[in-house]
Amino acid sequence: MSRRGVSSRSAATAATSIGGPSTRPPPSQHQPQQPTPTPAPPKQQQQQRSTVVAASRVAARGPGVGGGGGSQARVHDPSGRISEFWAPDDKCPQCKTDRLIAPKLRLLVSPCYHKMCESCVDRIFSLGSAPCPQCGATCRKNQFGVQTFSDLGVEREVNVRRRVGKM
């Protein structure tokens, strides 16, 4: 204890909190740990990976790449079946996001056959069922699907035939 009834330890912390001497080293003396390098994969495996990555990038770019361009394109799955319709002029009617703003824009189709981007579907239907912003029909998030055909009338007809075929 010091003469004033305050321990020397509390006096030292009071001095450091008001700009006194610090026990920490200055920032220039502190050196962060360097991460340990990982060993490089063999040359043959590295070439195979780069070929696969390059092929997937070309396939994901859409129309106009590698010839055969056009205003509309379809995204193919590995089995060769058509899985999702994709057009360069797609635009979400809710948030007005288009492919210039978000190149990876993905439009989903509601059970009442209205289009919305994935982020709008997540935002509107994340808490459960909600009315469709365009027609007011009650929808759920799990009822939205990808658009397979350019015409939503054809999309509707195919879905009706699929449901009738299950009966």
Image (cartoon, rainbow, N blue to C red):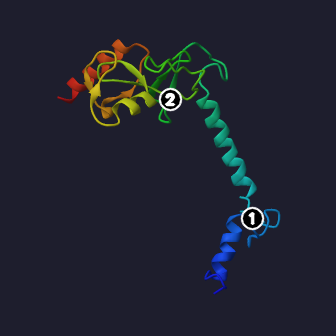
The one nearer the camera, 72 or 12, is: 12
The one nearer the camera, 133 or 89, is: 133
Q: Residue at x 48, y 27 (%)?
A: 106
Q: Position of residue 76 (x, y in %)?
A: 50, 29
Mark pair 2, 1: CA separation:
47 Å
Amino acid type for the residue under numbered disc 1: Pro
Mark positioned earlier in the residue sequence (2 or 1): 1
- Quadrant position of residue 135: top left
- Quadrant position of residue 38: bottom right
Residue linked to disc 1 = 32
Residue linked to disc 2 = 76
Q: Residue at x 36, y 18 (%)?
A: 114
Q: Count neighbours of disc 2 (C-alpha within 10 A) and say few if under 14, some if 14 to 19, many if 20 or more.
A: some
On-image quarter of the N terminus = bottom right
Q: Position of residue 70 (x, y in %)?
A: 59, 13
The one nearer the camera, 66 or 116, is: 116
Amino acid type for the residue under numbered disc 2: His
Q: Furthest-left residue in view? A: 167
